Image (cartoon, rainbow, N blue to C red):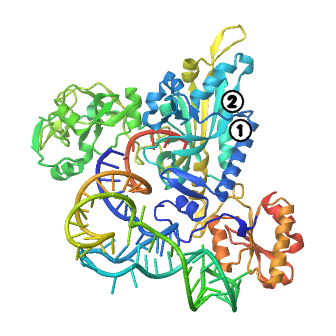
Amino acid sequence: MRWSKSFIPTLKEDPQDAEVISHKLMIRGGFVRKLVSGVYSFLPLGVRVLEKVKRIIREEMDIKGSQEVLMPAIHPPEIWKRTGRYEVLGEVLIKFKDRHGRELLLGPTHEEIVTDLVANNVKSYKELPLILYQIQTKFRDEPRPRFGVMRTSEFIMKDAYSFDCDVAGLEESYKKMYDAYCRIFTRCGLPFVPVQADPGMMGGSVSHEFMVPSEAGEDRIVICSKCKYSASTEVAECRTKAKSVSAKEKTLPIAQVDTPGITTIEKVSELLKVGAEKMVKTLIYKADGNVVAVLLRGDHEANETKVKNFLKVVNLELADSKTIEDVTRAPVGFTGPVGIRNTRIIADNAVRNMDNFITGANKKDAHIINVNIGRDFETKEFADLRMITKDDGCPACGKSIEVKQSIEVGHTFKLGTKYSDVLGAKVLDKDGKEIVAVMGCYGIGVTRILASVIETNSDKDGILWPISIAPYSTVIIALNMDDKKVKEVSEAVYDALSKAGIEVLFDDRNETAGVKFKDADLIGIPIKIIVGAKNAKKDIVEVKDRKSGAMTEVLLKDISAHLMRLTGA
RNA sequence: CGGGAAGUAGCGCAGCUGGCUAGCGCACCUGGUUUGGGACCAGGGGGUCGCGAGUUCGAAUCUCGCCUUCCCGACCA
């Protein structure tokens, strides 16, 4: 492709509304443009990278025997109502009406649709196992689209679904997909970590997230320094050892202290000169509409995923101030478990070990000290409800752990029969008996891969695409198109490489050398072929590596062989 | 939805305490000189100052409402 004929609108300056590196570089490099918040156009360069990634995905999925399908983006709501996810997804679903007033929605994912497809068309155990996948656009009304293409309302996903006769079959399919995912991310040049995760609204028992450590990530993961343990902080268990009875302190008489206007743990801690670890914070939640008090040690943070899973609820949100006032008869900031009304109390395991602690008094401008469970209030419900920190030990081996910000690029789930049951995906087994298909589902954020690769592969000049997914492997930089010999040699190189099947971008623009170098680096082409006047006279060109800067001189006649070696074409 | 910031040419910004025809850099068009890391000279085109109302003789500038975008929180590929 000739640059002079290409639609590659590069920018010299960072766009005003971009914060993270990948967003800035994708805009500046002319890969994408925003239409509205969370909705992007992919420009020619962006499409080329996207297609490279898709090809890798298809190759790896096909090798595992899964088959590509293409399901619709427009769905009838009925099928979503049958599985109950119409309500679970709620506002995330983008709904509209057709001309007949019939409600339709844009698919946020496709468990319902594939399961229905399989239910209607697969009848025998002989047809299983079956793995279907598609690369398709998903629509989700995100609460907050973010970071360019990282989190958008419309995005391209590769989603796969496995159907097996039994759990053993699912295990096999799951392993295949897991392996395929590792290969896909490796080929895309991503430093990924598979971690245990929470299945969330997908359902099922086991899930793994494929995480790319990066500052721009929206999630955190725990990695053990010693053993192989890795998990999302959402599920990483906190090992809280129960204190022995002998270690318990003698209980002191409960007493009220005045804390006028002091509503936060930090300020109470400051005022009473007591560490936050001697306090208990009481968080009032609404869990599927019911009020629940969650008790945590003052210096600990709630893990809402754990709370949700413990309570077996779908919706969990901090209660509004009115609810808190109803339950505690005090303003927000003085909440405590003592004397709280009509409220289920659950406590983190760490709270069980505490004696003579400080809590809110459920009274304006007051806290109480020397509070003890059993004596001053009662709860029998203890569980791991807090967020793990780097000071906690590894849940598996107890050694030190690291907590890293990460980007989720893939997620795999062992679904079981959640969908196949409801939607009737059943087959007859050997004995003619009906069995429900056991399912797994597997997602990759295709557009998000681009952002992740850039987050982990860039320098001050621009993107460093791995050759496997670079929009072009090679760019020819003709330093001066007005120089006859330079033009002639560049054209010859372009011709030779094109014929050799190398994906080459020929910068034939009438621009200065500086502009061409800057643009080439910005868009991240891995190999530059530089044609300058002096060398051109001797039929020599320079081949320069984008990442290392290493340069070699190559004779014109050898150029295509040389590039074929470099690119593996 | 809660909290914060911002909307002026394609992009990045200045102007904004009320006063001339709204400005700068980049980009773009024409001509010329240039060409090894974002060249130079000359000429030129491009604006509902986010939208609407109000105050005023006069509003990009002040007031109110709305919209949009970005950042921090709840969601997830």
Specify the label residue A38 is tagged with. Answer: none
Question: Residue A216 or A257: which is nearer the viewer?
Answer: A216
Q: Earlier in the sequence, mark 2 or mark 1?
A: 1
- Residue A486: where, in percent of width, then height? 80, 80
Question: Residue A211 or A321: which is nearer the viewer?
Answer: A321
Number of other residues with Cα within 10 Å of mark 1, as a class: few under 14, some 14 to 19, many 20 or more: many
For residue A259, above or below residue A382: below
Q: Which residue is mark 1?
A: A61
Quadrant of the drawing holding the N terminus of chain A? bottom right
Task: Residue A177: name its quadrant.
Answer: top right
CB under 8 Å between discs 2 and 1:
yes
Q: Give the residue type that dot 2 points to.
A: Ile
Q: Residue furthest right?
A: A557
- Residue A403: where, in percent of width, then height? 46, 49
The structure residue drawn at horizontal position 71% and vertical position 74%, both measured from the top left corner, is: A509
| Element marked by disc 2 | strand
Q: Which residue is mark 2?
A: A131
Q: Are marks 2 and 1 on the same chain?
A: yes
- Residue A133: where, in percent of width, then height? 67, 35
**Left or right, residue A276 beside residue A17:** left
Task: Please report, as a chain letter, where disc 1 is located.
Answer: A
For residue A82, above or below residue A430: below
**Left or right, residue A426 beside residue A560:** left
- Residue A63: where, in percent of width, then height? 76, 38
Task: Please report, as a chain letter, where disc 2 is located.
Answer: A
Task: Residue A533: name its quadrant.
Answer: bottom right
CA–CA distance in space, label 2 to label 1: 9 Å
Q: Give the residue type that dot 1 points to.
A: Met
Q: Is residue A191 visible?
A: no
The structure residue drawn at horizontal position 57% and vertical position 49%, both measured from the top left corner, is: A448
| Element marked by disc 1 | helix
